[in-house]
Image: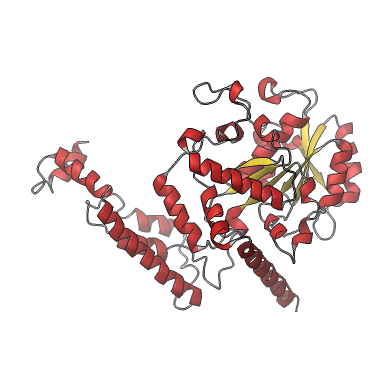
């Protein structure tokens, strides 16, 4: 603390006491005109950057540095600047220059979307307003918007009017949320209050191409490796639905209580879509929870050319879709949609009298009852904004174009 005070007292001449110095810092931090000036300049910088990067001229997708070099470069001078020495313009220029350029035409990067500028602007508004979303009173607008987004998505998936769900921070939390609901629904007892039944361990059937977050969710729930039953695949790396009965029977003979099946639409590493209709039929026959991890490829449901890839998704008990992958949104925003909206309330059944209470169960506007997160961002507003500004056609155009490009690329590789 002495070093901290000494550092500021050096530049105290014009300002007087340390208390006055701190007051001036706070005034600058919340100064509307300084914010206006910085905001205009940052938007101009980003607009110029977007114009340049879309041409693919003069910029690489990434100037590569080894991890050790990178951290040492940015450690230098990290906490040594005095107030006013670092300008917002210079800082933003450094961030832009040293980041991966997702909007570059030669970018073939990992998974996340090159966000639409309008969605990024709305993200700024959400960050500035910073309304939490645990209960309605702390985030009324964002709560209503999120509910409407889930209703729109559920209808697009072909789910009935009683569907429901939430937005959460990423597909990993989304898959965990869905499988927690599956556990509460199909275990045959109140797992939330009574814990596991070691005499009959729970298990879920999955593809070996499933995202690692599915296995991670199973292990977080305490089922261990034995809780993961891998189904054989066909030559296209899809679940071989003809092997379902034998795989299920073997697991039951081993004393496992199989409660769910997870399908890919599509898988992360290969883009394979599992055959949803026969999987749904099998789950119905065995009374299994049917979950579809559509984080990457569920958006095709809004296209005319590729919608057939998710035939049968309306029969799922739960679906996960990432808006930050194929819906032009900044990270993070993941939808967890339940065919029966009441299942969303069974996932987290804890009591928190200062926030939640049993008599408030079913109040859609208190989102903390249905999500792992208590404080969370105003995720729905960027999706709502794109729908209001451009309509569903924007997603159809974008996703169709990406899939067309992927097909063309595959043909180039084959040739």
Q: Is residue 67 visible?
A: no
At 75% from the left and 67% from the top, the residue drawn is 305
Image coordinates of residue 243 in percent, x first then y, are: 89, 48
Q: Quadrant of residue 188?
A: top right
How many marks overall? 0
The C terminus is located in which quarter?
Answer: bottom right
- Residue 50 vertical position relative to residue 205 in the rendered view, above or below: below
Q: Position of residue 109 (x, y in %)?
A: 58, 64
**Whether residue 55 is visible:** yes
Percent x, y for residue 252? 87, 33
Q: Is residue 189 left or right of residue 140?
A: right
Quarter occupied by residue 41:
bottom left
Examine the image and state in which quarter residue 222 appears.
top right
Estimate the x, y position of residue 388 in percent, counting from the top left: 55, 57
Which of the image's four quarters has the N terminus?
top left
Left or right of 88 in this view: 125? right
> Which of the pair 193/356 is nearer the observer?
356
Quick one: 262 or 43, which is closer to the camera? 43
Which residue occupies 66% across, 50% down? 153
């Amino acid at each position: 603390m002495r070093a901290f005070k000494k550092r500021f007292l050096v530049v105290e001449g014009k300002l007087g006491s340390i208390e006055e110095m701190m007051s001036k810092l706070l005034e600058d931090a919340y100064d509307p005109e300084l914010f206006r000036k910085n905001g205009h300049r940052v938007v101009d910088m980003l607009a110029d950057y977007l114009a340049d990067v879309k041409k693919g001229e003069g910029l690489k997708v990434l100037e590569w540095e080894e991890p050790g070099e990178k951290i040492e470069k940015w450690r230098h001078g990290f906490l040594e600047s005095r107030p006013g020495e670092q300008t917002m313009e210079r800082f933003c220029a450094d961030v832009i220059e040293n980041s991966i350029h997702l909007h570059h035409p030669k970018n073939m990067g990992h998974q996340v979307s090159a966000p639409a500028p309008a969605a990024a602007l709305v993200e700024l508004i959400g960050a500035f307003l910073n309304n939490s979303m645990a209960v309605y009173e702390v985030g009324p607008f964002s709560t209503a918007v999120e509910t409407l987004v889930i209703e729109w998505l559920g209808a697009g998936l072909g789910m009935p009017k009683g569907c429901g769900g939430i937005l959460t921070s990423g597909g990993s939390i989304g898959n965990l949320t869905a499988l927690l609901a599956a556990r509460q629904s199909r275990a045959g007892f109140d797992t939330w209050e009574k814990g596991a039944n070691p005499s009959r361990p729970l298990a879920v059937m999955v593809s070996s191409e499933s995202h690692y977050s599915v296995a991670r969710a199973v292990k977080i729930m305490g089922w261990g490796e034995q809780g993961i039953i891998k189904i054989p695949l066909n030559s296209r790396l899809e679940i071989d639905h003809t092997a379902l009965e034998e795989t299920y029977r073997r697991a039951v003979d081993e004393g496992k209580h199989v409660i769910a099946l997870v399908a890919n639409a599509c898988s992360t590493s290969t883009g394979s879509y599992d055959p949803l209709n026969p999987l749904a039929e099998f789950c119905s026959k065995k009374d299994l929870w049917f979950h579809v991890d559509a984080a990457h490829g569920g958006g095709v449901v809004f296209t005319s050319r590729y919608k057939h890839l998710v035939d049968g998704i309306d029969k799922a008990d739960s679906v996960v879709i990432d808006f930050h992958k194929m819906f032009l949104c900044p990270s993070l925003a993941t939808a967890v949609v339940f065919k029966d909206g009441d299942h969303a309330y069974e996932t987290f059944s804890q009591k928190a009298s200062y926030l939640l209470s049993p008599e408030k169960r079913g109040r859609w506007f208190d989102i903390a009852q249905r999500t792992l997160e208590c404080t969370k961002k105003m995720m729905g507003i960027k999706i709502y904004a794109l729908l209001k500004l451009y309509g569903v056609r924007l997603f159809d155009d974008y996703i169709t174009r990406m899939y067309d490009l992927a097909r063309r690329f595959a043909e180039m590789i084959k040739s």
